[in-house]
Amino acid sequence: MTATVYGYPRQGPNRELKKAVEGYWKGRIPADELRATAAGLRRSHWQRLAEAGVHEVPTGDFSYYDHVLDTSVMVGAVPVRHREAVAADALDGYFAMARGTEDVAPLEMTKWFDTNYHYLVPELGPDTVFAADSAKQVAELTEALALGHTARPVIVGPVTYLLLAKPAPDAPAGFVPLTLLDRLLPVYAEVLADLRAAGAGWVQLDEPALVQDRTAAELNAAARAYRDLGALTDRPRLLVATYFDRLGEALPVLAKAPVDGLALDFTGPAAANLDDLAAAGGLPGKRLVAGVVDGRNVWINDLERSLATLGTLLGLAGRVDVAASCSLLHVPLDVAAERDLDPQVARWLAFARQKTDEIVTLARGLAEGADTITAQLAANRAVLGARAGSALTCDPAVRARTAAVTDSETRRSQPYARRAAAQAAHLRLPLLPTTTIGSFPQTTELRTARADLRAGRIGPAAYEERVEKEIREVISFQEKAGIDVLVHGEPERDDMVQYFAERLTGFLATRHGWVQSYGTRYVRPPILAGDVSRPEPMTVRWTRYAQSLTDRPVKGMLTGPVTMLAWSFVRDDQPPAETARQVALALRDEVNDLEAAGVSVIQVDEPALRETLPLRAGGRPAYLAWATEAFRLATGGVRPDTQIHTHMCYAEFGDVLAAIDDLDADVISLEAARSHMRVAAELRAAGYPREIGPGVYDIHSPRVPGSDEMAALLREGLRAIPAERLWVNPDCGLKTRGWPETRASLENLVAAARSLRAELGGTPGR
């Protein structure tokens, strides 16, 4: 009965990995220094885990950019367009697949199941030739063993890898990557043999895709995969891991497979795995790794409840070990670093280090008896009780307001057709209007001013002067570039969720609570601990100032209620629908104040609508009902001639097309550049009736797309969307880009729109 984890935060306590990778990209440090930094972080992570009492540390979970991209390298699935770069320099080629180059597009990026982590989507076709490259996995295992650790390599399993993949651009219509399974399994067999030769006793194969609804053919593929891998003679013991939800109909498939153990999630909806495992007859003679500590949220574990679950599981498997529900990649590193948090509240929280301690405590209690952890159980019980009784969690006025919401408040006063006519007359925009998604580059000068304000080196007046200067520059550039609907650039915001969280009651902010979103992009999710309200306007001052500088419309920019929840660590002591309604009412006040200040276009971003979708279809209708209602509650109070926009990015939208319609936004902008306008065709097929801005500029790559390239994407979009309903915009906000590439790309975007207007016989615009 031992303690283990599936993965650990990669970045280091001061985001050392981010700084090293970006330093390498900019030519400030050589590859050897980057590798040395990475090795030092791995070493410190393993040492910390071992010192805490973790008996078996993970290897292979560390990544310079993304573990799914690492898997593509491991199996040799390098797209044709990147092979030359990979052959010339493996590290530079790896980053080219992630970010693209001046001439070559990167891999598509999308959300990792229902988390805020993004992975790079493998591109596969009938001509894909797999080839094993276990160098990374073997090297990291060898490092850990040399340091004296018991180590378990962790890699993405073959079934999940293929289910996450997409057909390559030149693949024939209807091609299904899962058909490559028989071609892929020998490569996994070779990797497993290499790891065994390097000293691996166990290897973990992650198969989270099996917690989703799966067809009989997909379940049969999983059975075949683990029948074949389990039958190998030259292999380590195999631990198949799933997480994020109950395994369901795939559980008996894996339980019967000739593998040596399963790792299952027993938190949240996945708690159903307990009854399902008992119904399947358990895992006699096999290892069960029980994920009883929530690896995705930051609240302390109920140790007594988890210990009871573990006690029940003892009778269902040959051996039970204790773990978090998933990799700890999804939580910050250490609560102890948050010295600004109220100590009372800090005791309610567990980040990666504290979760590791919880896992070790539970493993000890399971192995040696609950009486050996009596003090820990008593302290845990006291903190749970203190949180439940705290006045910080409940505001009677907020609860009374949410209870009084009526259906009419969740609907606009006029149907879309009438609103569209009123907005056209009011805004007088050209055909194919151009806009951006919200943020503009955050310059070093701007970040320095924000840091100086926090440190007290400058006062609020000096900081506001700096922000106003940035807004003037952003407005001036957009006017000169010819953009039709402007934004103020959001220079006052360091994060689209944290900015609002710091101005709403109920949210807590951290200083060091960084979590990886993708690559070197890290965010600090707020912690939603209590009831939510808006004490005062949050954005009106800056949007009004921007509008005073131009006669073109300036969008008000807000983050929607679902995204505020999804990109925060949300409270677990009340239903999320109730929390979303509280946030929606706070945003409704802000929307109404923006309109009263003369703002005619208001964007309420909901990029998390799709990513928060329950993994199983049975839970989706209830989620989508409260999620779309919350958006409409936030936006439903404006006049018909006020145009409501929303934005979504880097997700698979096909599952939520009806919900997108139910938002009743006047305009929606979506990621489409990397996915080659696929979403435009999906919206046409769904009969979506409103205006659409499919992105034509991939902002997650440093390359500058030419006007001809963007015009070609627009022509593709026009095949699905009538010109009078098509907008022209980037995929996402421009915060992470530099000014030179932003200027060039947006100028090309406007040129593309103008060329299409000329072809269509419309006016060229301003």
Image (cartoon, rainbow, N blue to C red):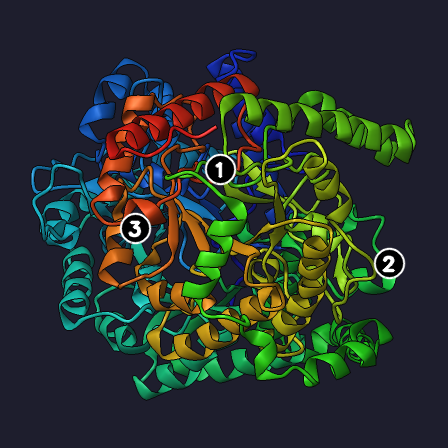
Distance (Cα) linking label 2 and label 1: 42 Å
**Residue lying at 29% horizontally and 36% vertically, measured from the top left:** 714
Q: Secondary structure at mark 1?
A: loop
The mark nearer the N terminus, 2 or 3, is 2
Along the viewing direction, whichever of 648 and 511 lies nearer the viewer: 648
Q: Percent position (x, y) of residue 328?
A: 55, 53
Distance (Cα) linking label 3 and label 1: 19 Å
Above/below status of 697 relative to 180: above
Determine which residue is flagged by label 1: 435
Q: Percent position (x, y) of residue 387?
A: 79, 74
Along the viewing direction, whichever of 85 and 404 lies nearer the viewer: 404
Instruction: Find residue 347 and report its image quarter.
Output: bottom right
Along the viewing direction, whichever of 498 and 601 lies nearer the viewer: 601
Q: Are marks 3 and 1 in contact (CB under 8 Å)?
A: no
**Residue lying at 37% horizontally and 32% vertically, measured from the top left:** 763
The mark nearer the N terminus, 3 or 1, is 1
Determine which residue is flagged by label 2: 342
In this rendering, would 163 be left or right of 245? left
Any part of residue 218 in sight = yes
Which amino acid lies under the numbered mark 1 shown in the image of this protein? Answer: Thr
Determine which residue is flagged by label 3: 679
Graded by Cα atoms within 10 Å as few (under 14), some (14 to 19) or many (20 or more), the crowding at tag 3 reads many
Which amino acid lies under the numbered mark 3 shown in the image of this protein? Answer: Val
Above/below status of 370 relative to 664: below
**Residue lying at 49% horizontally and 43% vertically, measured from the top left:** 428
In this rendering, would 304 be left or right of 42? right
Residue lying farthest front?
425
**Residue lying at 63% horizontally and 53% vertically, measured from the top left:** 352
Mark nearest the camera among 2 and 3 is 3
Above/below status of 440 relative to 561: above
Distance (Cα) linking label 2 and label 3: 45 Å
Q: Percent position (x, y) of residue 200?
A: 36, 45
